[in-house]
Amino acid sequence: MFLDFKVTGRENVPNKGAFLFVSNHVSFFDPILLGASLYRSLNYMARDTLFKTRWSSETMRTVHAFPVKRGRGDLSAIREALRILRTGRPLVMFPEGTRAKDKHLRRAKPGAGFIAVRSGVPVIPAYVWGSFEALPRGWKTFRPHPVRVYIGKPVYVKDRAQSTEYRVQGKEVYQCVSDEMMKRIGELKERAELENAN
């Protein structure tokens, strides 16, 4: 087969209501795979350069994506993210902020943690395995390779952030929440690598 695609943990996703779907990011293929892994329609943050032309902007909005300016706090994008979650719709975020150049996980940015705490919705971690090989960074065509999406159990970070569990206060809480997301993604990564070891 050209694409051997399997999803593990789909039962961890609620049938209704908002949640923050967070994942590693190594390929342009990742948003498509995350969308295909669920039976619900997802919303996406996407870098603003993907909205430069009228055609690309309309295409991105057709798949429920909205622009975010990277490298700085984009208040309009944050407001849009919170608005989407308030209306009960799920949102995909990549806590690392951009595609990685290899398969190693990077430290998350605090923005994902901010949105998780402010919205109060559950965070559902995911790990996409195989997309780096199927569509590497810089490639424009797919290569035959198995792809797996591993979905973890929901994490209710707002309750934890309001307690003393993170042992920090103020804005540092958001970074701790983002770090927690990456920890959960990392656990799924370990499982994926173990199950798909050659």
Image (cartoon, rainbow, N blue to C red):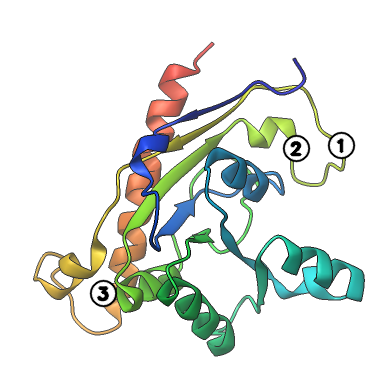
Q: Are marks 1 and 2 in contact (CB under 8 Å)?
A: yes
- Examine the rendering and report whether any part of residue 123 can be seen: yes
Q: Amino acid at mark 2?
A: Leu
Res 70 → quadrant: bottom right
* Residue 53, visible in the rendered structure: no
Instruction: Identify the image quadrant of residue 121.
Output: bottom left
The answer to which image quadrant residue 128 occupies is top right
Q: Which mark sits nearer the N-terminus, 2 or 3? A: 2
**Residue 178 or 35: which is nearer the viewer?**
35
Mark 3 residue crowding within 10 angstroms, few (<14) / some (14–19) / many (20+) = many
Disc 3 secondary structure class = helix
**Mark 1 belongs to which amino acid?**
Thr
Residue furthest bottom in the image: 75
Q: CA distance from mark 1 to mark 2?
A: 7 Å
Q: Nearer the viewer, residue 175 or 38?
A: 38
Label 2: which residue? 135
Res. 141 mark: 1
User: Residue 173, labelled with which disc?
Assistant: 3
Amino acid at circle 3: Val
